[in-house]
Image (tube, grey):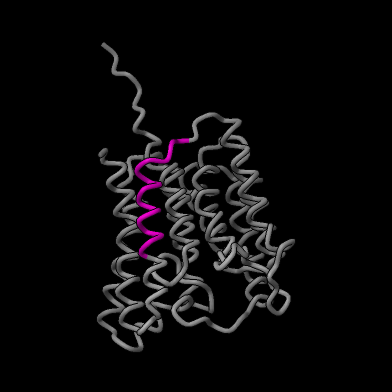
Amino acid sequence: MSRAGFVGLLALAFPVMGGLGALWLMGAPASFLMVNAGTLVVGLALIAFLPQIDATKTRRFAIVALLVLLALPLLTGPYVNGIARWLPLGPFTLHAGMLAIPMLAALTARDEDYSAPILLAGILAAAFQPDAASGLALTFAAMGLYNAKRDWKDGVVAGTGFFATLVMWVRGALPAQPFVERVLVDVAVVQPLAALALLACLVASFLLILHALPAPMAQRHTLAGTLFGFSIAAVLSNYPSALIGYGAAPILGFAFALSQIERAESKAPPVAE
C-alpha cells in the first residue's frame, strides 16, 4: 500500500476506533457499536480501492450530485421543528451534510475555476435546512482553501459562511441525541482522561489530513477544515460528533473524501533525464 493510502486509513481509523471506545464506555447500545464498526470496514475499503475521479467533467458532475444530495432533505424530510437535515434510507437516517460535505470539499479543492461558487451553493443549502454544523464545516473549508490559494473569492465565501452560520445557529437548535451529539463533552463528564484520549484521536486525524497526506495544500486544508468545523459545532452545541459519535454518515463521507484526496500527488510528474 502507498504511503498516501496508509495515511488515509489512519486518518479515518483513529477517531472512529476512539469513538467506539467512548460509546462502549458510555453504555451505548451494541447495535450502535456494530453500525460504526461495520461502516469503518466499508470506509477503509473505499479508501483503499475506490478509483480516483480524474476527468474534469466527471468531477463536476459529482460535485453537482453532492450539492443535490446536500439539499435533498428539503424535499424528502423528515422535518423536526421545521428543520430538515437527514436522508431517510430504510432503517437508517443519514445526516446529509456529513455524508456529502467532506467529498464535496475534496473535489471542490481540485476545481480551479468554480471552487468559490460551489462552496457558496453548499452554504446556501445548509442555510435553508438550517444546519449550523454544515455551515461551519463549509466555512472552514473555504478558509482552508483561501489559506492555500490566497484567492479573494474564497475569503469572501468564508466570511459569508461565518455570518450565515450565526443565523443558522439561532434558527436550528434541537435537543441533543445521546451517543450522537456532544460526545466529547459527555465523555468528559464521565471520564476526563478518556475524553483526552478521544480528543487526541480526533486531533491526530485532523493533523494527518492537514500535514501528512501527500496531496496539494488546497485539498488537505479544505478537507481538514470540514472536520474542524463539524467538530467545533459538536462541542459548542447539539450537533453530531463527526467520526467519534454514533452515525454512519460522517464515516462514509470522510472515507469517500479520503479516497479522492489521498492520491492527488501520487501521480508524480516524470523525472527529467
Relative to 81, say whether 269 is above or below. Answer: above
Quarter of the figure with residue 52: top left
Relative to 97, say whether 109 is above or below. Answer: above
Q: What stretch is highlighted in magenta?
A: 37-52
Quarter of the figure with residue 206: bottom left
Give the x, y percent position of residue 129: 69, 66
Give the x, y percent position of residue 43: 40, 53
Query: Looking at the image, which residue sits at the far front?
Result: 90
Residue 261 within the segment the image draws in magenta: no
Taking 20 as reference, is 148 left or right? right
- The residue that appears at 32% across and 19% down in the rendered structure is 270
- The residue that appears at 25% across and 39% down in the rendered structure is 1
- The residue that appears at 37% across and 72% down in the rendered structure is 33
- The residue that appears at 62% across and 63% down in the rendered structure is 87
Relative to 213, say whether 159 is above or below. Answer: below
Q: Which of 272 and 247 is in front in this view?
A: 247
Query: Looking at the image, which residue sits at the far bottom?
Result: 190
Quarter of the picture holding the C terminus:
top left
Quarter of the figure with residue 65: top right
Relative to 102, say whether 202 is above or below. Answer: below
Give the x, y percent position of residue 200: 28, 68
Q: Which of 40 and 202 is in front in this view?
A: 40
Taking 220 as reference, is 229 left or right? right
Taking 167 as reference, is 190 left or right? left
